[in-house]
Image (cartoon, helix red, strand yellow):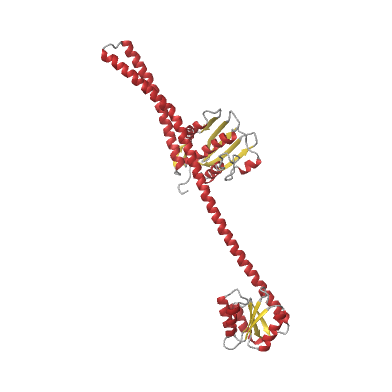
């Protein structure tokens, strides 16, 4: 027999009925296994695992309903067609209720009826198996997709965190360099004052101190002290601004803050990145705007937008300009960021907020900056964002978000 030949188990205690069915099925290229009663039929079912069973209802030792119960319990996907006498209609109905796939009334006068029932049952079985396989393949594909998404999300979170820490590292380096100037001036002034004080002490102890030398010393002390004070205040201002911005960038806590003051603190920490260029940043912000929101998100949005302008927008430009206009409107903040850089073409504009999209591939660009901005505005700040740009016309990014985010968010 061909390995693809379908096997049919015929269970019937009437020899002539069994022989006529077997002869027809074998002529139709089926492999046929026969059993003369229900008990023998179950043994043949276990031994041969047929593709379909034709089973009589009224048989000695074990009737067709018992066979049906055992088969549906062990292997419900095996089709069972009941071959029943005309007087057994109630039993046939019960068999269908218990899981039989079809029924044929015997004696079978037209074997085409048997042919149609068998092929219909086998086709139904094939469709069920294909559906089950498709479902299994779909579930497997879904599992693999979910695993891929989880891996992608973990990778994205790691990259976002790495970018945040890299930005924070640049902030530390920039502010440290910026602080060096006022601290250096302060140290130099203090050293100079120390020398003048020792010279003054020697004159005083020798009794040779003149009024003019006292006046000169007091003048020097006043000037140097003022210089030290100004530079130490400048250093303290830098440290204070940096401390708050750094804390906000490394945490996700909400607090009430004045937006104009916070924007200025953030720009102060960003100043070392552009102060030696010809680029400039101009801010117009309503000083009365108070936010109950996430300052770290605001800082990172501003940081990413400015760095995007410096790195991409102002590439090959000597004098780039950023204009930031912020106003309050019906409980919302309208934050407009505009630069006069190189702008974007239609494809770049369409993909600007996509994760990992960058025009600086291989040059240190991660493609996450604008994607992070989009997620921070739409999710963290619960707002919306619109990008307008044309090649050579710079970019205009309009963000709208609530002044106060509900405490349960």
Does the image show residue 224? Answer: yes
Q: Position of residue 200 (x, y in %)?
A: 31, 16
Q: Position of residue 322 (x, y in %)?
A: 56, 32
Q: Position of residue 271 (x, y in %)?
A: 50, 31
Residue for point 65% across, 36% down = 391
Closer-to-camera residue (292/16)? 16
Q: Position of residue 174 (x, y in %)?
A: 47, 33
Q: How many marks?
A: 0
Q: Which quarter of the picture shows residue 247?
A: top left
Q: Which quarter of the picture shows residue 99?
A: bottom right
Residue for point 66% across, 88% down = 15
Residue for point 53% across, 47% down = 156
Q: Taking 169 as reference, is 399 left or right?
A: right
Placement of 307 over or under 115, stated as above or below = above
Does the image show residue 292? Answer: no
Q: Which quarter of the picture shows residue 281?
A: top right
Placement of 204 over or under 55, stated as above or below = above
Residue for point 38% across, 22% down = 189
Q: Quadrant of the N terminus?
A: bottom right
Q: Taking 232 as reference, is 32 left or right?
A: right
Placement of 171 over or under 232, stated as above or below = below
């Amino acid at each position: 027999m061909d390995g693809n030949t379908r096997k049919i188990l015929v269970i019937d205690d009437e020899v002539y009925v069994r022989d006529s069915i077997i002869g027809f099925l074998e002529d139709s290229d089926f492999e046929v296994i026969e059993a003369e009663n229900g008990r023998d039929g179950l043994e043949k079912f276990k031994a041969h695992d047929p593709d379909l069973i034709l089973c009589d209802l009224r048989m000695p030792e074990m009737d067709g309903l018992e066979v049906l119960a055992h088969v549906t319990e062990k292997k419900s996907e095996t089709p069972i067609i009941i071959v029943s006498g005309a007087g057994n209609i109630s039993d046939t109905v019960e068999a269908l209720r218990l899981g039989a796939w079809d029924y044929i009334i015997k004696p079978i006068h037209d074997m085409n009826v048997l042919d149609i029932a068998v092929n219909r049952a086998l086709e139904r079985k094939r469709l069920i198996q294909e559906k089950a396989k498709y479902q299994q393949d779909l579930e497997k594909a879904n599992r693999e997709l979910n695993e891929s998404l989880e891996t992608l999300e973990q990778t994205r979170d790691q990259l976002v965190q790495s970018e945040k820490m890299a930005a924070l590292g640049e902030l530390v380096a920039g502010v440290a360099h910026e602080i060096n100037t006022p601290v250096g001036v302060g140290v130099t002034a203090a050293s100079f004052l120390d020398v003048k004080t020792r010279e003054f002490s020697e004159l005083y102890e020798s009794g040779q101190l003149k009024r003019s030398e006292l006046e000169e010393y007091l003048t020097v002390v006043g000037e140097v002290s003022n210089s030290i004070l100004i530079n130490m205040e400048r250093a303290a201002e830098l440290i204070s601004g940096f401390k708050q911005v750094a804390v906000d960038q490394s945490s996700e806590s909400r607090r009430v803050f004045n937006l104009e003051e916070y924007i200025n603190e953030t720009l102060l920490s960003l100043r070392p990145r552009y102060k030696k260029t010809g680029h400039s940043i101009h801010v117009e912000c309503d000083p009365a705007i108070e936010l109950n929101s996430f300052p770290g998100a605001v800082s990172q949005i501003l940081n990413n937008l400015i760095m995007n302008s410096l790195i991409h927008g102002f590439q090959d430009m000597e004098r780039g300009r950023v204009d930031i206009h912020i106003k309050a409107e019906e409980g919302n903040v309208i934050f407009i960021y505009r630069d006069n850089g190189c702008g974007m073409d239609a494809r770049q504009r369409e993909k600007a907020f996509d994760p990992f999209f960058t025009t600086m591939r291989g040059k240190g660009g991660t493609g996450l900056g604008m994607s992070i901005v989009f997620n921070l505005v739409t999710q963290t700040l619960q707002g919306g964002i619109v990008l307008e740009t044309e090649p050579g016309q710079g970019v205009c990014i309009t963000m709208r978000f609530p002044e106060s985010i509900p405490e349960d968010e």
